[in-house]
Image: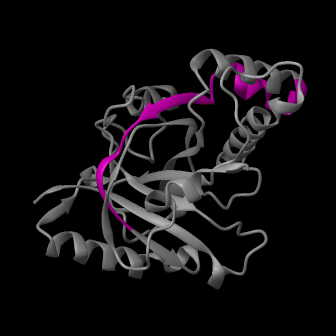
């Protein structure tokens, strides 16, 4: 049977429609950092998705090639995830003023057998097979990171992404009512020290995120996308919304 991370880790990927606390363990991700409106045609966000999916499916399909990573097992590629922040006053995890001010780290979870050595080999394979991605791959736009989120609160949002504020408000009330506070960087800046409206070093942000399995300083608004907006009506979309927490 093909391994499905969503089914094996239901507490992480399939929460209820009511808020709950969860301890998020260390996981390995392929990641790309950038900024700008995620809806822009051909923009940085869409280019990031091309890198993430190109790499992730190359790992999965290595089962059909002459080379296979040590410890390989067949699996369903996990869902797309995103960590989000923005310029001061633009986005606080609940309300969004200007999508052009958004910055993000887009991620897809990788099986544990995707070591740094496997990552480099597959990255090179993708660059050779997909010339349109080679420049970004060779420049290091795609990174392998490993980190834990630790204590968080999360909820399942059903519906359009633009309708998330009401769900986030419910999550925020739950966090406060239980004596906790959202542990998200204040003031619209990432813990790496830049505003989304100012150009930043994406590599430095990803290095800051990679805590080698520990909890990094940058704890951000987190979304996990369980539906494909290209094939799903907005009202039927499912999105896990997760906020890191600390004692109030």
In the image, is 186 to the left or to the right of 137? left
Q: Residue at x 54, y 68 (%)?
A: 239
x, y percent for residue 242: 39, 61
x, y percent for residue 55: 73, 34
Q: Does the magenta run of residues contain 136?
A: yes
Q: How many dots with numbers? A: 0
Q: Is residue 95 above or below residue 118?
A: below
Q: Residue at x 31, y 73 (%)?
A: 171
Q: Quadrant of residue 124?
A: top right
Q: Residue furthest bottom?
A: 235
x, y percent for residue 179: 11, 67
Q: Is residue 25 above or below residue 235?
A: above
Q: Which residues are magenta?
A: 129-154
In the image, is 238 to the left or to the right of 94? right
Q: Does the magenta run of residues contain 220?
A: no
Q: Quadrant of residue 174?
A: bottom left
In the image, is 178 to the left or to the right of 68? left
In the image, is 168 to the left or to the right of 159? left
User: Between 134 and 107, which is closer to the camera in this rendering?
Assistant: 107
x, y percent for residue 9: 49, 55
Could you tell me which quadrant the C terminus lies in?
Answer: bottom left
Q: Residue at x 71, y 22 (%)?
A: 69
């Amino acid at each position: 049977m093909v391994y499905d991370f969503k089914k094996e880790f239901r507490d992480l990927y399939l929460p209820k429609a009511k808020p709950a606390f969860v301890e998020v363990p260390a996981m390995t991700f392929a990641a790309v950092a950038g900024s700008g409106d995620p809806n822009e045609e051909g923009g940085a966000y869409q280019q990031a998705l091309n890198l993430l999916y190109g790499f992730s499916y190359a790992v999965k399909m290595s089962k059909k090639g002459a080379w296979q990573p040590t410890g390989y097992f067949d699996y369903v590629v996990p869902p797309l995830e995103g960590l989000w922040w923005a310029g001061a006053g633009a986005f606080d995890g609940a309300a969004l003023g200007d999508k052009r001010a958004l910055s993000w780290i887009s991620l897809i979870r990788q099986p544990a057998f995707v070591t740094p050595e496997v990552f480099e080999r597959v990255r090179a394979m993708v660059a050779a097979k997909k010339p349109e991605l080679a420049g970004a791959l060779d420049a290091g736009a795609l990174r392998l990171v490993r980190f834990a989120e630790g204590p968080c609160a999360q909820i399942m949002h059903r519906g359009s992404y633009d309708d998330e504020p009401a769900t986030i408000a419910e999550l925020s009330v739950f966090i406060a009512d239980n004596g906790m506070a959202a542990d998200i960087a204040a003031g619209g800046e990432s813990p790496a020290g830049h505003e989304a409206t100012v150009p930043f070093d994406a590599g430095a942000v990803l290095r800051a995120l990679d805590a080698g399995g520990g909890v990094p300083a940058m704890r951000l608004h987190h979304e996990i996308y369980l539906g494909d907006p290209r094939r799903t009506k907005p009202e039927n979309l499912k999105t896990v919304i997760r906020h890191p927490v600390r004692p109030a």
